[in-house]
Amino acid sequence: MSKQVNDIIARGEARIVEAPVAKATAPRHQVEVDRNFELPTGLFVATAGCYLAFLAITGAAFANPVLIIPMAIFALFIVAAFGVPAIWTRLKKNGLEANDTDPLTMGQFGATGIMTNTGRLAPRDATIQVLILPVLIVLWGLAAVTIAALV
């Protein structure tokens, strides 16, 4: 609760002290910034490649001048969805120094796996979890193109 201190000051019971002098150093941040996703860059490239492969497969199979603009927009969205995080991992934190950590190399990833919310994942399991949806989307595109060609 707040309380009025005017009467305490008037009675002389308040102790008045000087304001602390602020140091001219940079502020101390207690949270360590780590913009690393811990997965090897190759997995992100493979994921983006699968999405772009889906667009290439469907774009080539259903080639139509009307689809040029939507396919270009989809491709830009995919490039942005993977490009912005790639740029974000290389940003300087607080404008001072670069990100301290680098993504795991394939060798480090193969030796240690990654830590997830539910525990450590083996490299094979993590790779399957990352790539299962993009690969299924490519297979779905191939199935759709095959069905359209046969019908």
Image (tube, grey):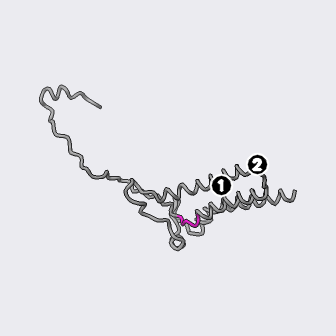
At x 35% / y 52%, what residue is drawn? 29
Q: Are marks 1 and 2 in contact (CB under 8 Å)?
A: no
Q: Of the residues shown, which amino acid type is indicated by label 2?
A: Val
Helix, strand, or loop for circle 2?
helix
Q: Would residue 99 be found to the left or right of residue 75 on screen?
A: left
Identify which residue, 119 or 9, lies in the foreground: 9
Q: Position of residue 21 (x, y in %)?
A: 21, 45
Q: Position of residue 133 (x, y in %)?
A: 66, 59
Q: Position of residue 128 (x, y in %)?
A: 62, 65
Count residues near mark 1 (Cα–Cα under 10 Å), then give few for <14, some for 14-19, many for 20+: some
Query: Toward which corner of the image does residue 121 lie, by quadrant?
Result: bottom right
Task: State the mark number for residue 66.
Answer: 2
Task: Please state, as top left, top right, bottom left or bottom right, where the N terminus lies in the image.
Answer: top left
Front of the two marks 1 and 2:
2
Task: Please state, as top left, top right, bottom left or bottom right, where the C terminus lies in the image.
Answer: bottom right
Identify which residue, 148 or 110, lies in the foreground: 148
At x 60% / y 62%, what residue is drawn? 130
Dot 1 or dot 2: first in sequence order is 2
Identify which residue, 46 or 115, lies in the foreground: 46
Q: Of the residues shown, which amino acid type is indicated by label 1?
A: Ala
Helix, strand, or loop for circle 1?
helix
At x 70% / y 57%, what residue is drawn? 55
At x 65% / y 54%, what residue is drawn? 75
Cα–Cα gap, marks 1 and 2: 15 Å
Q: Position of residue 127 (x, y in %)?
A: 60, 66
Does residue 141 show up magenta in the picture? Answer: no
Query: Toward which corner of the image does residue 11 lie, by quadrant?
Result: top left
Task: State the mark number for residue 99.
Answer: none
Count residues near mark 2 (Cα–Cα under 10 Å), then give few for <14, some for 14-19, many for 20+: few
Q: Which residues are magenta?
A: 39-43
- The secondary structure making up most of the magenta span is helix
Q: Which residue is mark 1?
A: 75
